[in-house]
Image: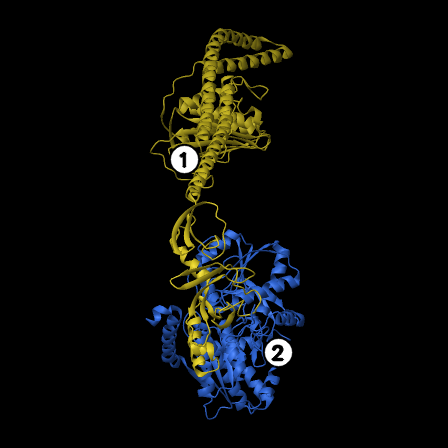
Chain colours: A blue, B yellow
Amino acid sequence: MEMLKHPVSGCITIIAATFALFAANTAQAERFELGASAQNADAVIGCLYPMTGRSATYGRDSISGIKIALQDLEAEAKSGLDVPNLRVIADDPRSKASYAVRLAQDFITNDNAKFFCGIVSSGVAHAVSDLAKNEKIIMVGTDHASSRLSIEAGHDYYFRVTNDSWTSMAAGARYLRDLQKETGWKRLAFVGPDYDYGHVSWTDLQLALDELGVEYETVGDLWPKLYEPDYSIYINALQSAKADVVVTALWGGDFIAFIKQAASTRFFETTRLANFDTGANYDVMMALGDQPYPGLILSARHHNNWPDTGRNKRFVKQFHDMTGRYPTYAAEGAYTGIIAIARAIEKAGGVDDDRALITALEGLQLALPEDPPGFASYIDPETHQIVQAQAVGTVVHNEDFPPSKLMVGNWAIYDAEDLKPSKEMVKRRRDAVAGGSEAVPPPTP
Amino acid sequence: MPAFIEAPNSPQAEEALTLLRVEADSPDLYGVLFFDWYDNLDRLVAGQAASGPPYWSKNGWDISGLPRVEHEGIEFIGPKLPENGNSGWILMRAHIRDTGLGQNTSVALHVRLASLTELLASAGVSGVIDPLLRTPGGIVLDATGRPTEVTGELIEGPSILPGWNLVMSVRPGTILQPIDETRFWLTVTAAVIIVVILAIFFALSRSLRRRVDTLVQGAHSIASGDLYYRLPEGRRRDEISTVAKAFNTMAWQLKDLIDRTVRAEKLAVLGQFATGVAHEVRNPLATMKTTVQALVRKEPDGERKTLLDDMGHQIDRLSRVVNDLLAYGRPGEACPQETEIRDLFRQSSRVLTPVAEEARVRFYTSGDSRLTIFVDPDQVLQILLNIGINAIQACQPGGTVSLRAERHNDQVEIRVTDDGAGIPKEHLLDVVQPFFTMKSKGTGLGLTISQQLVEYNNGSINIESAPQEGTTITLKFPATKSGASKEETSKNAPPDQDSDRR
């Protein structure tokens, strides 16, 4: 009877209880414990990666990236260097913010975690970032990419060590500017997942295009939900809009599903499809088979075939030797996260002083597999976002990384400093918002 | 729930917040919102799909102007249409009972508008029937949750909420359009095919006509007497080329037939004429010869005697001409028999060797001594003598004339070769014509008679010659079966075969 009288709150209670029980039963089964034992660890890092569903590949590869980082640190320790003894715990938040917050709280309570790391979905990352801020736990984001996390919602305890949506869209805007000189495209459409990352990516792209003075006409912005199985109505809408270029922020299995479904129509005959942040990921290359659909413009946060440096080749080989397959960009992100935490601890001289750790991370320079020759990534003290170069290209035949028959090539390289958001841009965006954090009463409109 | 609202920092509120987060984590929800009695947003729980107002910023959040309908105690607020890069949404709000503390609040699910409209997609027929959703504000939404302009016929569908109902946009043209397009393209294709066929037809017709015209022109040329006219046969192997080849063959055969006929008639006329003349001339000549001989015997004057001898020689020459004319006009019937080449060559040598020696020309015979041919031996001997004498006379002193016999399948080939003056190309066909001669003292009947005799003996004659290089006349006669084909050269020739005679 209570439920009949109060259907909304009744439903909430029942569903929440069911999900809570489900989460409690399954979370333990996905848990990974890597590195030092609890007794010997200098610091515990609690990581959250998906191990199920469309984004499971990202979690699996991230775990391998963490293992490679721990191996490298162990090798340094054996050679006599003073590196911290890290314990990494990883669990699966099942792409749910609620699970992620609960697991992160458990990391603090049960495992005495000093750092959070990982998280693929920006929506989930927002929730955990809020928790990190409240609990004063340093969070090192390795995968999610919404630039809102570091600009509008940035705080002292939040850092990110892979290219964010701003960096990718700044590179993409430059590519589109150059493409316009070549092809004269005018009509632009955007399709992104209907959550923080998708909307921020679209905002970032528009801002970057405006900064460059690119003239274009927006003919549509579409927002299928995350993990949407059927994109047919959105593909029809994009075709009806007669866009010259469609930029997408769909990622992982969503992006692959979109390409497959678009390929069954005449979409690629008339339209270029660009994905500047995640499109060149290795799982996408594999899914393309031997079909280099015309008009695909892709990039990702790490490429197995770019840059052609010893450091990158070594990382890819380490991953391949360990797993028998080639990595998605998630692996290099997770690797970077662990290395960044280790270097920060070394620099701060321990883990007891939060302020010292934050100071150590601010401006921390890291030579990473995705750095082109002559450049080392560094964390911008202003935004806590790592500053990195980015390469954008098109699909070419390349069987150097089987089973994929295609890789991205014809690279256009964009320098890291050019892709960094200007201080004015950061200030403008931060001034334009007024909070928005959950459970905090927003100002009355 | 009351604790969450009224005592935000209590443990109960924390537990409620956790449960609300779980609820808000659906991709179809942006979050769970709490409002006070005055519709002001009091608290919110963001789901993972949250973006834009009210989660990011106070700007752009206003529900006061949105349509509101109520159904079974739930208030539906919206839709808020997508704009400025933000998605559209509706609120499903329920009022929470007064907790006793005087607070009347409400809780709302912040629902993704597209999650509602996406359900329409399954009810449509792609491109023909588009299911749309009409909202309380009268705005019609498509399956992606965006306002759309309706151009076709609208069929009202069922109502899902007060003021919300489905409408079907029916575009029959979409069904007919492909058929119309197909019909149009079929018509165009048919027209193109007809044009192409006509073009090919005219091209072929013109080409065929041009080639047939050539045939007609050839026929006219032949008809007007140009028997040397030949059609270009080309490389193609089509019917016209076949006809052209057949036409050319016919022209060759026609010319050959006419040549033969003309020659036959010419021979017949000449034969009658020659026979008549010979009869009339021979007897007086005999009388003149006898008279001259008598006069010579009695003539004491040496000078006159010489003149009378010359007259006698001229009379002899006239007699030979008359004999030749008789031979030409009244050839004897051939009596073929097995004849040995060696006999023919021996008899020929007996006559020709002295002639050759006188002309200081080397003469010899060679070949297989055992060959036999089925011919009239007297006529063939006459042929060999005629041709042999011509050959010797064509040679300068020091020249060479040879007879050589070889067997080729069922025929024996006799070649009479000299290295004399040769015959100019333009005269090759004339040398067998009666009275054509290149010699100052010839009658012009020798080769003509020889050709006649060759034909009587079922043989053939062929003349090859080059000026200043010599002439080879090849005679072919049927071989007899007993003839062997053993090749013998002059070096090992048997004694009865003359060789290298002079």
Residue where numbered disc 1 is placed: B407
Residue type, numbered disc 2: Tyr
Q: In this view, does A211 lie to the left or right of B502?
A: right
- Is residue A17 placed above or below B464 in the rendered structure? below
User: Image point 60% across, 88% down: which residue?
Assistant: A356
Give the quadrant of residue B61: bottom right
Element type where label 2 sits in the image: strand
Give the quadrant of residue A313: bottom right
- Same chain for the residues under marks 1 and 2 in the image: no
Residue A82 in the figure: left or right of residue B449: right
Q: Where is residue A150 shown, x and y percent of the image?
A: 58, 74
Q: Write down the chain letter for disc 2.
A: A
Q: How far apart are marks 1 and 2 (CA)?
A: 106 Å
Q: Position of residue B356 (x, y in %)?
A: 54, 29
Q: Is mark 1 on a helix, strand or loop?
A: strand
Residue B119 location (% of width, % of height)? 40, 58
Residue corresponding to mark 2: A378
Instruction: Identify residue type, mark 1.
Output: Arg
Mark number displayed over residue A420:
none
In-front residue for pair A387/B18? B18
In this view of the protein, which residue sits in the foreground, B403 or A388? A388
**Residue A199 on image: x %, y %:** 54, 65
Residues at marks 1 and 2 touching, judged by CB atoms closer than 8 Å? no
